[in-house]
Amino acid sequence: MRLRWKLTVASLKMFTRQKEAIIWTMLLPLFMVFLFGFVSFEGLGKIRIGVAGGEDEPAGQLAGQLGEVRTVQVTRGSESSELEQLTAGKRHLVLVLPEQFHAASGKELRVLVNDGTPEETQLGLLILRKVLDDETFRMHTAPGRVPMTLQSVASRRSSYIDFLLPGVLSLAIMQSGIFGVAFGFVALRKRGVLRRLSVTPMRPQDFIAAQVAMRLMVLLTQIVVLVGVGIVFFDLQFLGSLLDLFAMGLLGGAVFLAIGFFLAGIARTEDQVVPLANVVSLPMMLLSGVFFSRSNLPEPVRLVTEFFPLTYLADGMRSIVLEGSTLPALWLQLAGLALWSIVSVWAAVKVFRWE
């Protein structure tokens, strides 16, 4: 145990002496957070409208007509569940329909509005009013407007940086694991360092354990630094537990470290590891919901990305930060990462070589 600790400290010193390693693991994620943090993307999303009540056919038709508007995303559920989503800032409007509702019934609609997003709320109300008016005239009734009662609900307003920072943190963990390990060990093998270490009294597994421990320590530092920057400079709404964030990050880090060892095993030179690492990391970086919501993806693509390890990690980190979720509530993300870690470690053990 003492030997592994000394090796870990030595590996940490080696890491801090590599300027490019510091840039990739610390400064680049910080640069991305500052870059996107000062750019407003608030108007790029869809208007999210929840529809509750009114299980009959006219209510379904109204929800369908709202969903046909390209800028609107409609979900249906119970009033309690939709109100919960509205309070959490995940809906801009919630439309509560009475029984046997249709545009010409004269029954009053109750609309719950998100007071934290006034621009989206006003646009959603205009779209709702237009759809109701069109339906009224389509039924050839007297030109009377459907009465609506607005009820303002105090909701949590999430900015783009709240969405972005957990994604960038997950991306930094992936990049550190895949590129750091793959490039580092291929370079050590090319220089013959691994071969010489394998004939010393030191056991190879001690060296590997020290490298893994060092990179997990760097991972924890990344989490602290990025979350601290988000809170201090961008008013990040951190609602969860830092320990839960550490646990999720460590499990995700184990997955990507194992993938890095796998790539280091199948690549013979540094020229080979570059395209391999990019083939693995780029689809996840672009499609796992790091910079934008995966709900904007085409449905077949979105279903495939559900099973990416970075998707499990980013969704888990984001739920902890923004919703205050605990680890038991994130069993699906934990199970997905655990399965990926088993497969990745098995594959890495099969292909990794010292020479």
Image (spheres, helix red, strand yellow):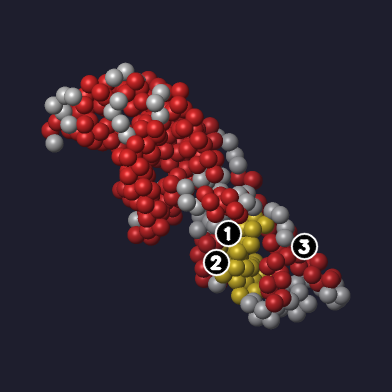
Identify the residue at horizontal 68%, vertical 74% (top origin): 59
Identify the residue at horizontal 59%, vertical 53% (top origin): 300
Does residue 145 appear to the left or right of 190 in the view shown?
Answer: right
Q: Measured from the top left, where is residue 69 in percent x and y?
A: 72, 58
Question: Which element is circle 1 on?
Answer: loop
Q: Which residue is mark 1?
A: 91
**Split into 4 quadrants, where in the image is the N terminus?**
top left
Identify the residue at horizontal 16%, vertical 24% (top origin): 200
In three-dimensional space, the C-alpha distance between marks 2 and 3, rounded to whole angstroms, equals: 22 Å
In three-dimensional space, the C-alpha distance between marks 3 and 1, rounded to whole angstroms, equals: 19 Å
Q: Which residue is mark 2?
A: 82
Identify the residue at horizontal 36%, vertical 47% (top origin): 343
Q: Earlier in the sequence, mark 2 or mark 3?
A: 2
Amino acid type shown at disc 1: Arg
Based on the displayed image, in which of its 4 quarters is residue 259 positioned?
top left
Q: Residue furthest bottom?
A: 100
Question: Which element is circle 2 on?
Answer: helix
* Structural crowding at the residue carrying mark 2, measured as other residues with C-alpha within 10 Å and reported as few (<14), some (14–19) or many (≥20): many
Q: Which mark identifies residue 130?
A: 3
* Structural crowding at the residue carrying mark 3, measured as other residues with C-alpha within 10 Å and reported as few (<14), some (14–19) or many (≥20): few
Q: Tell me, yes or no, whether the two marked residues, 2 and 1, touch with CB atoms within 8 Å.
A: yes
Labels in figure, total:
3
Q: Measured from the top left, where is residue 137 in percent x and y?
A: 84, 70
* Structural crowding at the residue carrying mark 1, measured as other residues with C-alpha within 10 Å and reported as few (<14), some (14–19) or many (≥20): many
Based on the displayed image, in which of its 4 quarters is residue 101 positioned?
bottom right
Amino acid type shown at disc 3: Lys
